[in-house]
């Protein structure tokens, strides 16, 4: 087990006043709108994809944050605020599996967050969660209709009211990637020895994977708050990232890449920083989970209250298209199901939305 207490590091070469940035919860959802960004404007959808909401899989959920599919087509779903795990079958049957010990939503955006199924054992689930003292990566055994006690793998990650990150994804080689937010201390994102403000690459024991660029867990750094991770068909890792006052981002993740926060928000011509493939102003997006299929990224928009459809061409991204705008409220996650449909979860019961009697829900979208 790695037990690391993450301390603040003062970054001396940043922009003036970076340490005094006024942090906004969940990607500046309530900030005044700046001028519109030119990179997220189009009304033309690709002719080969016609997304439609085919059905509602489940209703009455509590901030369904992460979705992990089993081969059967059923899925484990994490409920952020009450710290519990569900299994939802393809026919919509919801089976509570119990709470995850220690998961705590006392902070405004914490609780039970991202989950990922062990690619070699469907009875083993990895989860990222906040407790009353820290954020941590844990391993869970799921037996029958019950979830076991969490086994800590990484503990002591600095927690805060917001900027937890929390998304998990395995690559084809069995490496686990974990996004961790800056924990409301922006300067730490530029410290390659800090876990906050990074994307980690780990083995199944939570240890640094062989070949990592800095000899520790860190794969990339300079991140503010990544809540979406997905691989494309060629094994490239893409990440969605909340901005503060200016730009939200879709990034292509490079080994050892510095993504600029807090020195840069949005695009940059500084060769020391990796520039985003797409940006949105923070008033129209607040990006969360992403899924990639058919050379297209589908990205959840919280404040944007939509799913963004973004065509991908190798390492390039085209102009985004807004789907289901305002129809279902805040969107938290998008995942590709075994039948190649998308499961899309809402996030209207997270204290920022306007829930109705069906919220939160999971929708099935056909392409």
Image (tube, helix red, strand yellow):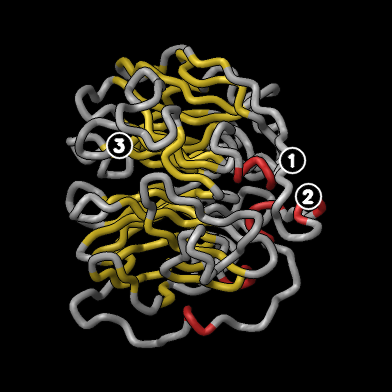
Q: Tell me where residue 148 sits by quadrant.
A: top left
Residue 59 at x, y = what percent? 46, 48
Q: Are marks 2 and 3 in contact (CB under 8 Å)?
A: no
Residue shown at the point (21%, 41%) measured from the top left? 73
Residue 19 - label:
2
- Determine the CA span between mark 3 and mark 1: 33 Å
Residue 170 - label:
3
> Which secondary structure, mark 1?
loop
On screen, residue 63 above or below 136: below
- Looking at the image, residue 263 sits to the left or right of residue 118; the answer is right
Q: Are marks 1 and 2 in contact (CB under 8 Å)?
A: yes
On screen, residue 35 above or below 107: below
Residue 196 - label:
none
Q: Are marks 3 and 1 in contact (CB under 8 Å)?
A: no
Camera sees residue 361: no
Residue 169 at x, y = what percent? 35, 39
> Which secondary structure, mark 2?
helix
Sooner in the amino-acid sequence: mark 3 or mark 1: 1
- Looking at the image, residue 138 sits to the left or right of residue 67; the answer is right
- Looking at the image, residue 96 sits to the left or right of residue 8; the answer is left
Residue shown at the point (63%, 48%) measured from the top left? 350
Please identify, in this view, whether the residue under mark 2 or under mark 3 is nearer the observer: 2
Q: Residues within 10 Å of mark 2 (few under 14, many from 20)?
A: some
Residue shown at the point (50%, 71%) measured from the top left? 279
- Determine the CA span between mark 1 and mark 2: 8 Å
**Toward the viewer: 90 or 65?**
65
Q: Which residue is mark 1?
A: 10
Q: Tell me where residue 233 sits by quadrant.
A: bottom left
Please identify, in this view, whether the residue under mark 1 or under mark 2 is nearer the observer: 1
Residue 102 at x, y = what percent? 59, 19
């Amino acid at each position: 087990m790695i037990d690391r207490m993450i301390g603040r590091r003062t970054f001396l070469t940043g922009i003036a006043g970076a340490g005094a940035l006024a942090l906004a919860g969940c990607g500046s959802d309530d900030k005044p709108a700046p001028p519109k960004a030119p990179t997220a404007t189009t009304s033309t959808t690709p002719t080969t994809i016609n997304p439609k909401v085919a059905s509602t899989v489940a209703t009455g959920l509590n901030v369904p944050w992460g979705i992990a599919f089993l081969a059967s087509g059923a899925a484990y779903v994490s409920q952020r605020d009450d710290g519990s795990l569900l299994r939802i079958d393809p026919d919509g049957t919801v089976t509570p599996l119990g709470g995850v010990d220690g998961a705590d939503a006392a902070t405004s955006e914490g609780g039970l967050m991202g989950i990922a199924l062990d690619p070699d054992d469907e009875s083993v689930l990895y989860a990222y969660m906040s407790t009353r003292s820290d954020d941590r990566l844990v391993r869970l055994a799921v037996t029958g209709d019950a979830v076991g006690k969490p086994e800590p793998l990484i503990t002591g990650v600095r927690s805060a009211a917001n900027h937890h990150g929390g998304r998990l994804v395995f690559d084809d080689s069995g490496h686990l990637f974990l996004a961790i937010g800056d924990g409301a201390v922006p300067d730490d994102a530029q410290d390659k020895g800090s876990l906050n403000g990074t994307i980690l690459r780990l083995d199944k024991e939570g240890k640094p994977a062989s070949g990592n660029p800095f000899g520790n867990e860190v794969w990339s750094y300079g991140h503010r708050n990544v809540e979406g991770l997905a691989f494309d068909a060629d094994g490239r890792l893409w990440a969605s990232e909340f901005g503060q006052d200016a730009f939200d981002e879709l990034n292509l993740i490079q080994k050892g890449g510095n993504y600029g926060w807090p020195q840069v928000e949005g695009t940059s011509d500084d060769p020391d920083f990796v520039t985003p493939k797409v940006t949105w102003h923070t008033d129209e997006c607040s990006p969360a989970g992403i899924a990639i299929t058919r050379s297209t990224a589908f990205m959840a928009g919280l404040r944007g209250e939509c799913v963004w459809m973004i065509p991908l061409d190798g390492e390039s991204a085209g102009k985004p298209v807004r789907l289901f705008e305002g129809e279902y409220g805040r969107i938290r996650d998008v995942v590709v199901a075994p039948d190649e449909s998308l499961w899309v979860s809402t996030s209207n019961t997270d204290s920022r939305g306007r829930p109705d009697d069906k919220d939160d829900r999971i929708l099935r979208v056909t392409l």
